[in-house]
C-alpha cells in the first residue's frame, strides 16, 4: 500500500523483504566498526544526539559534509557501495519520483530504547534530489511536520522494519523527527536490539 503523507512524501510499508532487511542489517554491523564507525554526534550547543551515527560516501557533521570523520577519529569515511546507490535509485523509482542523480551518501542512525531525534530539516545537501529512508529493527513513531515551523501542524506515523519513506519535491525541506522508539518490536530474525535508519542522499558535491 502506497501512502502519500504530504505532496512528495511517500510511504511504502514493508518495501524491503525480510531477506533484504537481514542483508542490510549485516552490512551495517560491519560498517559500524572502527575506523569511521558508529559515533556520538556532538551538537554545537554542547549537547549530543541520542541516536548514534555513521556515514558512507560523505561524512555528515553539524552542519556540513567532509571526506573524513572531522568530529571523531579523523579516519576517511567508508565508500558508498554501488549496490547501496542502486537501492537508493530503486527506492526513488518505487515511490514514483524521477531518478536524476547518483546516491552518494548513506547516513545511518542507530536508536536504542531511549534515543530520539528532535524536529529538524535536512538542508546540508547541495542537491534537491529526494531523500530515501529505510527503517530496520524496532518500530518508531516518526513525526512529519511542515516546512515553515518545527511545531504543529504535524502527522505522526509508525515506521516498521522494512518500511521505505521517500521525501521529494515540496516535502524535501519539511521538518521531521523521531519522538520515540517502541522497544522489543524488531523482527526476531534480525537479531537487532534497537532501530537502524538508513537514509540515502545525493550530496551535490564533487570534492
Ligand atoms: C524528511 N533521520 O537522518 S528518517 C536524519 O529515522 C533523520 O533516523 C530520522 O531525520 C531517522 O536526518 C528520520 C526520515 C527522514 C529522513 C530525511 C528527510 C525524513 C525526511 C529529509 C527531508 C524530509
Ligand atoms: Fe533528518
Image: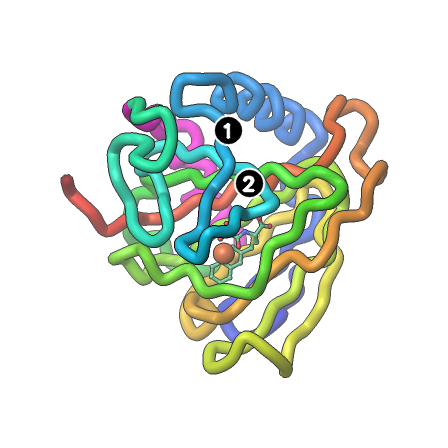
Q: Is mark 2 within 8 Å of ligand 1?
A: yes
Using the numbered discs, state the Cα–Cα distance from disc 2 to disc 1 in whole angstroms. Answer: 9 Å
Which residue does the image show at 51% across and 80% down from the upper left? 149
The magenta stretch spans residue 161: no
Which residue does the image show at 34% across and 53% down from the upper left? 63
Which residue does the image show at 61% across and 68% down from the upper left? 144
State the residue in front, 47 or 196: 47
Residue at numbered disc 1: 38
Q: Which residues are magenta?
A: 76-95
Residue at numbered disc 2: 109
On the image, the x and y values in percent for residue 106 come to 42, 38
Q: Specify the principal SS of the magenta part.
A: helix
Q: Please, which residue is most extreme toward the front here?
A: 46
Question: In the rendered view, would you say 159 is above or below 120?
Answer: above
Which quadrant holds the N terminus?
bottom right
- Element on which disc 2 rests: strand
On the image, the x and y values in percent for residue 34 come to 45, 17
The magenta stretch spans residue 91: yes
Amino acid at each position: 500500500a502506497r501512502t502519500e503523507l504530504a505532496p512528495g512524501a511517500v510511504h511504502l510499508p514493508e518495501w524491503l523483504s525480510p531477506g533484504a532487511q537481514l542483508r542490510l542489517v549485516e552490512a551495517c554491523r560491519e560498517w559500524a566498526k572502527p575506523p569511521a564507525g558508529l559515533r556520538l554526534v556532538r551538537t554545537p550547543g554542547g549537547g549530543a544526539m541520542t541516536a548514534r551515527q555513521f556515514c558512507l560516501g560523505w561524512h555528515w557533521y553539524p552542519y556540513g559534509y567532509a571526506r573524513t570523520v572531522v568530529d571523531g577519529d579523523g579516519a576517511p569515511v567508508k565508500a558508498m557501495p554501488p549496490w547501496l546507490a542502486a537501492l537508493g535509485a530503486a527506492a526513488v523509482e518505487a515511490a514514483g519520483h524521477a531518478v536524476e542523480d547518483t546516491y552518494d551518501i548513506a547516513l545511518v542512525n542507530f536508536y536504542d530504547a531511549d534515543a530520539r531525534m528532535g524536529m529538524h530539516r535536512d538542508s546540508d545537501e547541495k542537491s534537491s534530489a529526494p531523500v530515501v529512508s529505510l527503517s530496520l529493527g524496532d518500530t518508531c513513531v516518526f513525526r512529519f511536520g511542515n516546512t515553515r515551523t518545527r511545531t504543529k501542524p504535524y502527522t505522526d506515523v509508525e515506521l516498521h522494519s522494512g518500511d521505505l519513506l521517500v521525501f521529494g519535491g515540496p516535502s524535501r525541506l519539511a521538518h521531521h523527527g523521531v519522538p520515540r522508539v517502541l522497544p522489543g518490536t524488531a523482527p526476531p530474525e534480525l537479531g537487532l536490539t534497537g532501530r537502524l535508519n538508513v537514509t540515502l542522499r545525493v550530496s551535490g558535491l564533487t570534492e
